[in-house]
Every structure is written in structure tokens, then in C-alpha cells.
Image (cartoon, helix red, strand yellow):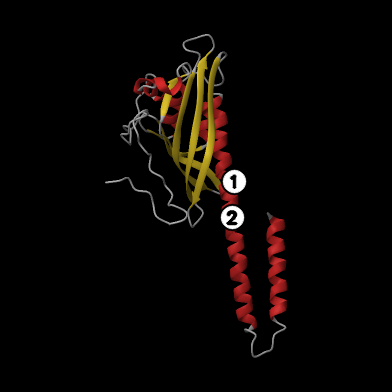
Amino acid sequence: MRVVVTICVLSLIVALLVTMQVTPAQAPSLAEQLAATNARLAAIQQRSSRIRDINEIENLQRIYGYYTDKMLWDQVVDLFTEDGTLEIGLSGVYVGKDSLRRYLYSLSDGRQGPIEGVLYEHLQLQSIITVSDDGQSADGRWRDLIQTGTYGAGSGGQWGEGPYENEYVKENGVWKINKLHWYATFIAPYEGGWLKVSEDAVRDYSVGKGVMPDRPTSDDYPSYPAASIPPFHFANPVTGDPWKPDP
């Protein structure tokens, strides 16, 4: 990244020297040239910062997925702000690190770490990251592809899928998850696949075992085979218009 910025700065200097070869009547003042050069350099630096922010947020979310795969719940909780929220499907909303930890541990019978014979994979895909103008917060949409199951039990496992709409904040230069919300499209048995989905499967997957959320589910939406679209945080990149459901 520093090499790119250095090349851009050298290009600006060359351009400035070239402009200084025009006649005095045509040339802008030195102050004007310097102001224009500084403005272009600031724009390059801001663009560089936004690219770095996006890369760091994408790494943060992917690391969340890897930790979740192995039920490393303490490490998952460390990725959140102190008052961060977590909402998985029909789980309701859990607020703050203590509540997050209580919910997550309930999914693995109070244990931390991978369990022999248990598959719990969560692929974090299709990221769309939108960083705020001040670079201190961001929104992100992802797709979670899920594979779960217990060796030798049941139908052979489950498939799951659905998007996240998440919020991130930068604290002391470090990006953290402030709000994680996964919308369940479906949870289905491996045998028969998404032709055998049910709301009960979503509930069994997402609702905490023996724990209660701090707030009820924030959005009332049906899972597949019903049709629903979790709201996009971003506008159409061509028209600039946000998507709105038909009235």
C-alpha cells in the first residue's frame, strides 16, 4: 500500500513540474498548485484507508466464522464490542458479552471447543462492506452456508443458508462487531435437502438451550419456502436508489 501511495505522490510531483513549464500568464499560482496537489494526495490517502478498513472487516468476519466452526465461544465473544448484540435466526437478541457467552455456550452443552463427531461449519461468503465517511463504523452483508451434523446420527446432517446484516465499529483503531444478525433462509436435512425444510428446524438450530434472550426477535419474517428479503443496508450502485419492498 505504501508503494502505491509513493508512486501516486511521485506522479503528482511530475505533473506539477510539467505544469510549471507553461507561460506565467497561463500557469496557476504556486499556492494553487500546492493546494490542488494536497487535495489529490488527501483523496489518495482516504481511499487507501478505506481499502484497509474493508480488508480488516472482512478478516474480522471470516475469523468469526472459523471460531464458530470449532465452537471457540470465548474467542467469538472477544470479537464484539462490550455492548454488542447477537441475533441468530429465531434466537432473539442477546446484548453484551456476558449474554453472548451464555447463549453460545448453550449451543454446545456448556462446552468450549470442537466436539468429537460433531460437524458445525459456517462459511462466510459474498461480502458487501460499506464504511462510513468518517471511517469509524461500517455495515456488512454476508451469506452464511451451514453444514452441521453428528456422526452416525439422524439423517446424516443438515444444510443451512441465510444472509447476515451486520454493523461494525472501530475502537482505538481496531474493528469489532457491534451487531451481528443472521437471517435464516432455511435449515434442512441432508437427505431430501431444502425440499424438506421446516420452521421447527430453524428454531431448533438457532434458539438457545435453556437460556433466554435480552430482547425478542427484532424482525418477524418467514423462512423458505416463504419469500422474504432481509433489508439491504446499501443502495443500488448504478442508480443510487435503496431497494424498497413493493407496497
Q: Which residue is mark 2?
A: 49
The dot on residue 55 is 1
Q: Looking at the figure, which quarter contains the N terminus? A: bottom right
- Which residue appears at 38% of the width and 49% of the height? 243
Q: Residue at x 32, y 45 (%)?
A: 245
Q: Nearer the viewer, residue 199 or 179?
A: 199
Helix, strand or loop for disc 2: helix
Instruction: Name the image quarter holding residue 42.
Output: bottom right
Determine whether, in the image, residue 216 is placed left or right of residue 70: left
Q: Amino acid at mark 2?
A: Ser
Q: Residues within 10 Å of mark 2 (few under 14, many from 20)?
A: some
Residue 44: x %, y % from top left? 61, 62
87 lies above or below 14: above
Kindly give the residue lying farthest to the bottom in the view shown.
25
Q: Residue furthest top?
A: 152
**Is mark 1 in CB contact (under 8 Å) with mark 2?**
no
Identity of the residue drawn at 53% across and 40% down: 126
- Kindly report the distance in space between the C-alpha atoms of the residues bearing marks 1 and 2: 10 Å
- Rendering coords of residue 95 (x, y %): 39, 35
User: Which of the two labelled residues, at mark 1 and mark 2, occupies the earlier sequence position?
Assistant: 2
Residue, x 61% and y 70% (percent of image)?
38
- Label 1 is placed on what type of residue? Asn
In terms of secondary structure, where does tag 1 sit?
A: helix
For the residue carrying disc 1, how many other residues have a C-alpha within 10 Å: few (<14), some (14-19), or many (20+)? Answer: few
